[in-house]
Amino acid sequence: MNSLLGICIPTYKRPDQLTACVRSILLAASHHEVPVYIADDSTDETNEQAIKQLQREYPFIFTSKNKANLGIDKNILNAVDLCPCKYAWMMGEDDRLTPDAVDQILGLLSSLDSEQWPFIFVNYASVDADIHYYLNRQVLPLEEDLIESAEQFLVSHAWAAGFIGGCIVNTTAWEKIEREHYIGTYFAHIGIIMEMIQGRQVHLVARPLVLNRCGEPRLFTWSDATFTVAGGWGQLMQRLVPIYGRELCQRATMAFEAAHGLYSLRFLCYTRADYAYRTKHYREFIQPLTRSRGYQLLARIIAYTPPALFYSLRFVISRYRRMVNPKVATDKYLNQ
């Protein structure tokens, strides 16, 4: 069994997605005997048959079932804690690895001093729910691998590490960080990473090696808490102020909001389509914003408009994207 790299998956109640994710990992990792660690937060038998079948297919799959539901933050951390390897690559249960991803990363890790590089960021591609076409072939537009200071990474690219599939951590450095301070922000893993790389450098892998399913709030287990989760980034930055200073943390918050189009009218229409934006969200998250009267009026109108209208518009847009955007490779593991 490989001791340099392990892949860690926090999972909830999506056994079909978990199965497709793990099989994409096996395609990329099995010839290296890279172990897979699954932290099951379902607290019931939802994932049991899927995990047993995967274990029959590959002997290096290890699972831990939580006695009580830990929630997003704690289960991500729990998944990493299961891994005894030198490096842990986090992976969402509905992500997919590209076939040569593990080859690329093992080659890189073998050449690095683990004490010098506590964190590696891996670029990724955004795809639609069915993994038929690309929404973004390369989330960070990097032409080649990049080395950044922790401060540069925080203000420019840390927002992208909110997607856990882009995160590879040195487990020894990870274990040294007190994590309770960051739990509850929905981005606790980022808090730990940013604290452990303070004064260090980050290696950013330019080539996208992971596929991230996105495009609609309904894809996520936390879709009903979209605004709460998004607002958690600001809370995390407040907790990092003693380490990085207020100015850098404010810039990191602005970068996060800009990257996701957070609170834009387009974002409100997008979330309204899945009923993830309602009048209560307007009152709690939008009304307090310092924005123009016109923005506030339109935001309120969107909150009262029937979701079916925006859903229909999004359906038309998604069909158009399906026709014009680049197609994803039809490998059976990537598209299962």
Image: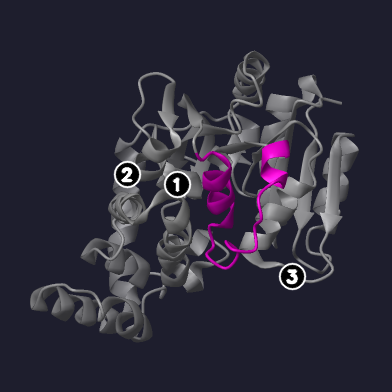
Residue at 28% in and 52% down: 258
Residue at 52% in and 38% down: 211
The Cα atoms of the two marked residues, 2 and 1, are separated by 9 Å
Magenta run includes residue 333: no
Label 3: element kind: loop
Residue 145 location, x and y as percent? 44, 20
The Cα atoms of the two marked residues, 3 and 2, are separated by 37 Å
Q: Which disc is residue 128 wearing?
A: 1
Q: Earlier in the sequence, mark 1 or mark 3?
A: 3
Q: Quadrant where the N terminus lies?
A: top right
Residue at 73% in and 26% down: 29
Q: Quadrant of residue 150 in the image?
A: top left
Q: How many marks?
A: 3
Q: Circle 2: is it few (<14), some (14-19), or many (20+) Cα within 10 Å?
A: some
Magenta run includes residue 195: yes
Residue at 36% in and 26% down: 142
Q: Residue 216 or 323: which is nearer the viewer? A: 216
The residues colored magenta run 172-198
Q: Residue 335 or 78: which is nearer the viewer? A: 78
Q: Earlier in the sequence, mark 2 or mark 1?
A: 1
Asked if marks 2 and 1 touch (Cβ < 8 Å), the reply is yes
Label 2: element kind: helix
**On screen, residue 69 above or below 162:** below
Left/right placement of residue 237 relative to residue 86 reads: left
> On the image, numbered disc 3 is attached to which residue?
69
Left/right placement of residue 97 relative to residue 244 reads: right
Q: Is residue 135 visible?
A: no
Q: Circle 3: is it few (<14), some (14-19), or many (20+) Cα within 10 Å?
A: some
Q: Amino acid at mark 3?
A: Asn
The colour mode here is one colour
Q: Which disc is residue 321 wearing?
A: 2
